Amino acid sequence: MADVYSKKQDLPVYAEPNPSASVVAKLKFAEKAKVVSDQNRWVNIKTSSGQTGWVYSGNVGDRRPPEENKADLLAPSSGVDTAAAGRGLSEAAQQYAESRGYVNAASDLAWLDKENASVSSADVKTFMKEHKLGEYAS
Amino acid sequence: MNRRNFLRLIGLTTGATAATSSLNAFNIGGVNVPVPLPTEITGGVNVDKVAEGSQKIAKGATGIGAKEEAAIGEAVAIGIIGKNGGLARASGPAQKIIYIGKSLAKYSYRPGLNFRFGVLNSSIVNGFSSPGGYVFITKGLLDAVGNDDQLAGVLAHEICHITRRHALQTISRGQLVSGIVDVASGSSSDFSAFDAGTDKIVNKLLDTGFDPDDEYDADKFGAKLAYETGYSKNGLKDFLEKLKSTQGDSKKIFSTHPPLSNRISKLS
């Protein structure tokens, strides 16, 4: 049986291949599971503790994610829209913008941060449901 | 212009004040600005300690940690924007690529990274990425794509440059790293070295692009990412074929990428 690894921390393992099903287990970041079968982008897995269930294929990979990816999941900006918008540029980036005459570009970047932060994780979930994307396809 | 005035100009001097159960502070222009983190995000965890912990996680093969990547990415993004006519701020197209881009990012190998998507005010057909999660496509590209599958294919390609750390590997392989990383981490204030290094990265991204192997790698993993998000796995290939049929292997189309014919062949 092939192995898959969780890309996320506390990835839900569902009783059925849809995100409305009950959660029977959770996988930690980079946790390995055995592939039992797959069906329409859903993967039936068996966890190291022997629990079987379904994960969406986009949430797991066939190679272990690099350890440094965990920093993304722990960073204050991870999925936090307001924090990302209010964080501001690093001093190094500010200095670069000033020294190269890119003040307008820095202003654009600040606008971009806010524009992106205005789209929350919940908004993206709604969009994906409306367009039947990813785990919300069926 | 001093830093305070500069920050005021770009609108970064106002702190957020929403009531929340957890506050995190970022230093902006010498002022600690409280930034609220909702409890559904923090889960009651002390975010300051978590952020500190995230810096202690292995920096991986590139030797460039999250904090350094963010600072380098911002500066490179500023360079990309500055050299491409600024950002197109029309809200409609910008919002569309944000929604599609964030949907793709959810299933990428770095789902926790703060990806941001923007449209460059340029008529050329190209896409760029910067470390730290910045993805740009040109207005020319946006006008040329035929449907959302093709747009998703392009965005997925650029996302994979970031998740596969192609730019960071280029930096760590070359002589650029020494002058950049120390400043990006805050341990050095030799900004002239940082500026010169950033210029080299920006010029490489905009003039010659990534190594061809990195481009084919991003094509391959991007097609997989698009498919897993629910878009066609052939979106990028279809777009490249459309461009080839109308433009040939013109140097003005994806000029920083390998020839269209080679990319189409490898995606087939």
Image: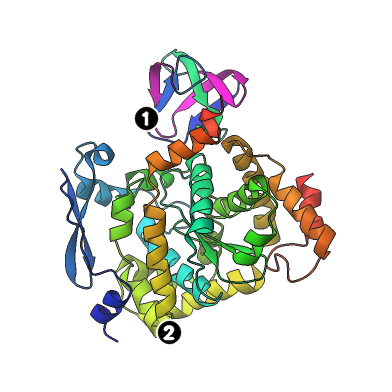
Figure check: B11 above or below A27? below
Determine crowd level at label 1: few under 14, some 14-19, many 20+ residues with C-alpha closer than 10 A: few
Q: Where is residue B200 in the image (x, y as percent from the top left)?
A: 54, 76
A127 with respect to B190 (left or right): right
Of circles 1 and 2, which is in front? 2
Q: Where is residue B70 in the image (x, y as percent from the top left)?
A: 39, 61
Query: Do we see residue B175 in this rendering?
Result: no
- Give the extent of the magenta segment: A20-46
Task: Name the amino acid, label 1.
Answer: Asp
Considering only order in the chain, which callout, 2 or 1, is on the residue closer to the N terminus? 1
Residue sitting at 19 percent across and 62 percent down? B33
Residue denoted by label 1: A10
Figure check: B120 above or below B55? below
Residue denoted by label 2: A101
Helix, strand or loop for the magenta stretch, by majority = strand
B44 with respect to A13 (left or right): left
Please tell me whether residue A38 belongs to the stretch shown in magenta: yes
Q: Position of residue B246 (x, y in %)?
A: 82, 61
Q: Position of residue B92 (x, y in %)?
A: 51, 56
Determine the chain carrying the residue at label 2: A
Figure check: B163 above or below A61? below
Residue sitting at 80 percent across and 56 percent down? B262
Under circle 2, the secondary element is loop
Whole-number angstrom distance, CA of label 1 to CA of label 2: 45 Å
Determine the chain carrying the residue at label 1: A
In the picture, the quarter occupied by the N terminus of chain B is bottom left
A105 with respect to A35 (left or right): left
Figure check: B1 above or below A81? below
Query: Do we see residue A120 in this rendering?
Result: yes
In the picture, the quarter occupied by the C terminus of chain B is top right
Determine crowd level at label 2: few under 14, some 14-19, many 20+ residues with C-alpha closer than 10 A: few
Chosen colour scheme: rainbow
